[in-house]
Image: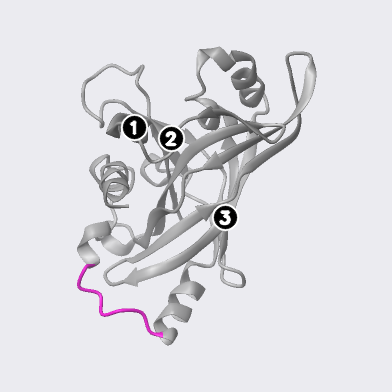
Amino acid sequence: MKRLSKLFIIAACSLGTISLTSCLGDDDNGSGITDEVYESYLANISGIFYGNGTDWRYENKIYFFNEDLEGTTVDEKTDSVKIQTVEFSKRDTTFTIHGVPTKVLAKEISDSNKDLKEAIENVGTTDITGRFDFYNIGNVASYFVWPSPVTFSNLTYGGKSHEVKILFFAPSAGVYGYTTGNRYQAVNFSLSVGAIYVDGAPKETIYNGSGTQLDELKSILTVSATR
């Protein structure tokens, strides 16, 4: 997880997607999580993050690495798409990202599976669900996320209908806190697209924990939402 955490810090902090009062490495002095504190933060994070449609800095977005953009730095090659809302539930410690453009889920599928990639893109939007759990609470609350596979039950391409699943490499990390000046509550967390399965069989691996740092960075989608 150490390398993934570093890339998450690059995505969530250095790129300025949202300026939290502290970033992931700043709450190492947390004294642990008591049941009372855990339940309090669970209640605080629970609910819907609608974003701010009038200020681009606080819009709900997914940030990702786009190799086609001009520049040489991660910052210069960072792209984004808008999402609708992000919802956390204290009842069963689940999250839902509503209105995710499917093109970001398909962006690393190779040209050898072009028909499959285009079919996923043509879906338009989908939701991503999963579980989360706090592991450290200090200046910000840090948590792990375990996203569930995204399933398209009847996706047609190549003249046939298929069940297509997008699996994620998990767990990945997130933070919950306040933006600079305590103006908004904010969540940032990363998802790493792992593999594509078609009709129960592996079709293409995107990232499985091996490969280069660039491979990992290209697989990461950083979710940023406020309220």
Q: Are marks 3 and 1 in contact (CB under 8 Å)?
A: no
**N-terminal label among 3 and 1:** 3
Q: Is residue 24 left or right of residue 47?
A: left
Under mark 2, the amino acid is Tyr
Q: Is residue 96 visible?
A: no
Residue drawn at x 46%, y 50% as measured from the top left: 170
Q: Is residue 123 visible?
A: yes
Q: Position of residue 224 (x, y in %)?
A: 42, 47
In the rendered structure, does residue 17 fall within the stretch colored magenta? Answer: no
Residue drawn at x 39%, y 56% as measured from the top left: 174
Please name the residue that numbered disc 3 is placed on: 130
For marks 2 and 3, give the CA distance.
19 Å
Residue drawn at x 40%, y 57% as measured from the top left: 186
Q: Which coloring applies here?
A: one colour
Nearer the camera: disc 2 or disc 3: 2
For marks 2 and 1, give the CA distance.
8 Å
Nearer the camera: disc 3 or disc 1: 1
Viewer-side residue, 141 vs 192: 192
Q: Position of residue 162 (x, y in %)?
A: 75, 28
Please name the residue that numbered disc 1 is placed on: 211
Which disc is residue 207 wearing? 2
Q: Are marks 2 and 1 in contact (CB under 8 Å)?
A: yes
Q: Is residue 159 above or below residue 197?
A: above
Q: Are marks 2 and 3 in contact (CB under 8 Å)?
A: no
Within-10-Å neighbours for mark 2: few <14, some 14–19, many 20+:
many
Under mark 1, the amino acid is Gly
